[in-house]
Image (cartoon, rainbow, N blue to C red):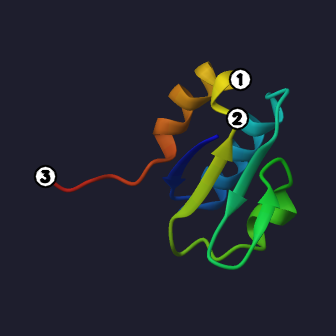
Amino acid sequence: MYTTQIMLSSIEDVRNFVNLTNQCDFEVNLTNSKYKIDAKSIMGVFSLDLSQPVTVEVEADKAGAFLEKLKAFQPKTEE
């Protein structure tokens, strides 16, 4: 299993992320300290506290191109 943290800071980010996950033929989950939801559900994503980073969980052996596209949602690091 592959996990990484992402930030969904706007409604547009959530829409783009859910559209991306719905193109996958494998499970994608989002977790925070309390919940684990299906990342293909826009209502589920909006039920999470999106003011903090959330963790994406996918089966790494199936997720090659998806993982590259996920980088657009990873928190920006200050240099």
The residues tagged by marks 1 and 3 sit, at their Cα atoms, a distance apart of 32 Å
The residue positioned 58% from the left and 58% from the top of the image is 55
The residues tagged by marks 3 and 2 sit, at their Cα atoms, a distance apart of 31 Å
Q: Which residue is mark 1?
A: 62
Residue extending farthest to the front is 1
Can you give x and y, in whole percent of width and height, for residue 51 in the image?
Answer: 53, 75
The residue positioned 75% from the left and 73% from the top of the image is 35
Q: Secondary structure at mark 2?
A: loop
Q: What label does residue 79 carry, if any?
A: 3
Q: Secondary structure at mark 1?
A: helix
Q: For marks 1 and 3, give the one nearer the viewer.
A: 1
The residue positioned 48% from the left and 39% from the top of the image is 72
Can you give x and y, in whole percent of width and height, for residue 75 in the image?
Answer: 40, 54
Q: Which residue is mark 2?
A: 59
Mark 3: give few (<14), some (14-19) or many (20+) Cα within 10 Å.
few
Q: What label does residue 74 carry, if any?
A: none
- Residue 36: name its quadrant: bottom right
The residue positioned 51% from the left and 26% from the top of the image is 68
The residues tagged by marks 1 and 2 sit, at their Cα atoms, a distance apart of 6 Å
Mark 1: give few (<14), some (14-19) or many (20+) Cα within 10 Å.
some
Can you give x and y, in whole percent of width and height, for residue 73 in the image?
Answer: 50, 46
Q: Secondary structure at mark 3?
A: loop
Which amino acid, by three-letter code, is at mark 1?
A: Lys
- Residue 63: name its quadrant: top right
Which amino acid, by three-letter code, is at mark 3?
A: Glu
Q: For marks 3 and 2, give the one nearer the viewer.
A: 2
Residue 5 is left or right of residue 44, and the answer is left
Going from the N terminus, do you reach mark 1 or mark 3 first?
A: 1
Q: Using the image, determine if residue 57 lies above or below residue 54.
A: above
Q: Quadrant of the N terminus?
A: top right
